[in-house]
Image (cartoon, helix red, strand yellow):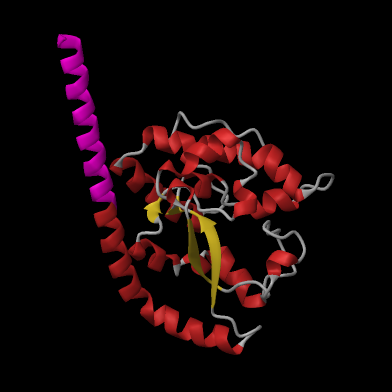
Amino acid sequence: MCQISITSRLAKILIKKCNMYLFSKRVLDIIFSFISLTLLIPLFIPLIIILRITAEGEVFYFQNRIGLKNSNFYIWKFATMLKNSMDMGTGSITLKNDFRVTRLGKFLRKTKINELPQIINILKGDISLVGPRPLVNKTFKAYSKEIQAKIYNVKPGLTGIGSIVFRDEEAIISNIKDEDPHEFYKRVIAPFKGSLEIWYQDNCSFSLDLQLIFMTAWVIIFPNSRLYENFFKDLPKREF
């Protein structure tokens, strides 16, 4: 009876700790989104005008993604590719120097500015600042059934450990010469990326989220850096 009482007490403590973490995470998301949107308006307005009068005139790109508990939502991005790009070339996988990416789109993708409208998704609660990247259905299905069942037990994020480690994903896939990009993604990238996201769930904390935010800024400034390996010693090892 005593053992049951102790176990019950520990469970309550863990639940309370988890709820506090989720509450703190949501507060950070809301504060971050409001401040960021306010600061980014001077950047967004001219960028929206330029996108409107160049390429195909598309400003935003809305795409169905997998979210919390494998639900669906539409993600916001600045348009960087030709219309109907999912039906061209390599579809859901983007290669380095992909012909579907517009001239301005190359700059927006390299600097990650194209991802900034997702701040609206954060404000709405579709995603968090930190978490596994929300994927399109085809790419999501490259994960094993086990990973599919677990990866979105936490809210997806604007950035996360997978985004940091695979900062150069387009270049990695582009360098594959003797294998279909989709097969390579399914065989090599998806299993490793899945293991990274499960690592995040096993270790998630407010402190880890702050470290991942810092590391995201670091790899944007130094895209070839692997400093994250020194930060997170117990990460699954990258073999490629």
State the image coordinates of residue 89 (x, y, percent, origin top left). 77, 63
State the image coordinates of residue 211 (x, y, percent, origin top left). 36, 45
Residue 205 falls inside the magenta stretch: no
**Residue 45 appears anywhere in the view:** yes
**Residue depicted at 47% across the width and 35% down the height:** 198
In which quarter of the view is residue 12 placed?
top left
From this view, report whether residue 183 is shown above or below residue 13: below
- In the displayed image of the protein, which residue is found farthest to the front? 1
Image quarter (top left, top right, bottom left or bottom right) of the C terminus: top right
State the image coordinates of residue 225 (x, y, percent, origin top left). 53, 47
Q: Secondary structure of the magenta portion, mostly?
A: helix
- In the displayed image of the protein, which residue is found farthest to the right? 178
Residue 225 horizontal side relative to residue 99, left or right: left
Q: Nearer the viewer, residue 110 or 183?
A: 183
- Which residues are drawn in magenta? 1-25
**Residue 231 appears anywhere in the view:** no
Residue 15 falls inside the magenta stretch: yes
**Residue depicted at 16% across the width and 9% down the height:** 1
Residue 188 horizontal side relative to residue 224, left or right: right
Q: Nearer the viewer, residue 30 or 71?
A: 71
Count of number-bearing discs: 0
